[in-house]
């Protein structure tokens, strides 16, 4: 039995629709997407604090380059 057979997916989607309702499905999808992104970033070793530090460092380097040119 394949895990992603069309009939199985349809049954799962109908159950999710009955449990959460049509109004909350977009919120559920958005939160699931954010969760998957944060898990992927965690596995890849990305860190939001490190990214923010890299951006600040790039900005300071750019400022120092423009100041040295003047």
Image (cartoon, grey):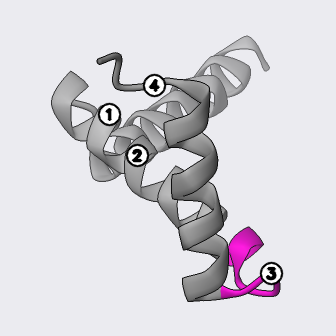
| Cα distance between the residues tagged 4 and 2 | 19 Å
User: Mark 1–mark 3 contact, CB under 8 Å?
Assistant: no
SS at circle 1 = helix
Relative side of 44 to 31, left or right? left
SS at circle 4 = loop
| Cα distance between the residues tagged 3 and 4 | 23 Å
Give the crowd class for mark 3: few <14, some 14-19, many >=20 residues within 10 Å: few
Relative side of 58 to 69, left or right? left
Give whichever of 38, 4 is nearer the camera: 4
Relative side of 34 to 48, left or right? right
Q: Earlier in the sequence, mark 3 or mark 4?
A: 4
Q: Which numbered disc, 3 or 2, marks the residue closer to the eye? A: 3
Q: Which residue is mark 1?
A: 40
User: Mark 1–mark 2 contact, CB under 8 Å?
Assistant: yes
Task: Say if 35 sits above or below 26 in the image.
Answer: above
Q: Which residue is mark 2?
A: 36
User: Mark 4–mark 2 contact, CB under 8 Å?
Assistant: no
Q: Which residue is mark 4?
A: 4
Give whichever of 48, 57 is nearer the camera: 48
Q: Which residues are magenta?
A: 21-27
Instruction: Please give the name of the residue rendered at 45% of the width and 25% of the height, measured from the top-left corner.
Output: 4
User: Mark 1–mark 4 contact, CB under 8 Å?
Assistant: no
| Cα distance between the residues tagged 1 and 3 | 28 Å
- Does the segment drawn in magenta span residue 12? no
| Cα distance between the residues tagged 3 and 2 | 22 Å
Q: Which residue is mark 3?
A: 22
Q: Which numbered disc, 4 or 2, marks the residue closer to the eye? A: 4
């Amino acid at each position: 039995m394949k895990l992603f057979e069309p009939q199985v997916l349809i049954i799962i989607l109908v159950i999710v629709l009955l449990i959460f309702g049509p109004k909350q499905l977009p919120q559920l999808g958005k939160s699931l997407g954010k969760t998957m992104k944060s898990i992927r970033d965690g596995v890849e070793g990305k860190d939001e604090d490190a990214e923010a530090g890299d951006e600040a460092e790039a900005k300071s380097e750019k400022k120092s380059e423009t100041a040295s040119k003047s």
